[in-house]
Image (tube, rainbow, N blue to C red):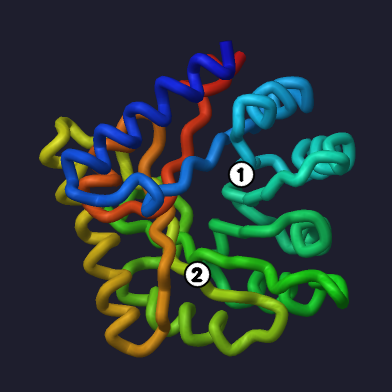
Amino acid sequence: MIADNLQRVRARISEACLSSARPQWAVTLLAVSKTFGADAVRDAYAAGQIAFGENYIQEAVDKITTLADLPLQWHCIGPIQSNKTRLVAEHFDWVHSVDRIKIAQRLSEQRPPGKAPLQVCIQVNIDGGPNKAGVTPDAALELAQQVNALPHLKLRGLMTIPEPAADFAAACAVHALARQLVDALNAQGLGLDTLSMGMTADLEAAIQSGSTMVRVGSAIFGKRE
């Protein structure tokens, strides 16, 4: 089932790239495996999936340890409390949810010697959702500059989780704000190359608007209990 689901999601990405006049290689699929066990991740890997996103840090660390025999890439896409930064710094390859400098500093300080720099995205509350994490667009430049100056981190781009949109055009309009923010930050010399936006329901709109990484869970692994 997971292999068939992955094939369908990849087809959606291919079609969205084609309709947006973008090459398929420009968009990475991140399989969101939170709440699903190591066996589900193994099945997805067997179907060619390498990059996995996790929201719950301790659950993720258990999976990462269990699956250490596989060459997987692990992305932390959930909120990070100060007492969990060491686990993230030690076990993950990417973090999408940095929204304050304190967390970034701790991740930098706690990244083990010899490990590659932790790849980091800043989470931006792009549409001002009242219950969403992330910095405001106006605060993104200052935080990006601060993170960019830290050792052991590599600032890659932005991550957004906008509120559900009414239709495709509305979704594209919100996602376009994130694309414009990346362009504005790059005009300040930051050299960002990643825009992590779009999920199962809106990946086509996100790709149309310039997403380079879509985070898909339920369309791959099924509904969560």
| Residue in view at x 17 percent, y 39 percent | 19
Nearest to the observer: residue 83 or residue 184: 184
Report the residue at 26% width, 42% height from top: 17
Which numbered dot is residue 51?
A: 1
Amino acid at dot 2? Arg
- Residue 156: mark in rendering: 2
Indicate the position of residue 150 as horizontal and vertical percent values: 64, 85
Q: CA distance from mark 2 to mark 1?
A: 16 Å
What crowding class fits label 2: few (fewer than 14 Cα within 10 Å), some (14-19), or many (20 or more)?
many
Q: Amino acid at mark 1?
A: Ala
Drawn side of residue 114 relative to residue 53, left or right: right
x and y percentages locating residue 225 in the rendered image: 61, 14
User: Percent x, y for residue 107?
Assistant: 72, 70
Dot 2: what SS? strand
Q: Residues within 10 Å of mark 1 (few under 14, many from 20)?
A: many
* Residue at (74% x, 74% y) in the render: 106
Label 1 sits on a secondary structure element that is strand
Where, quadrant-wise, is the N terminus in this rendering?
Answer: top right
Question: 92 and 82: which one is in front?
Answer: 92
> Residue extending furthest left?
169
Quadrant in which residue 95 is drawn: bottom right
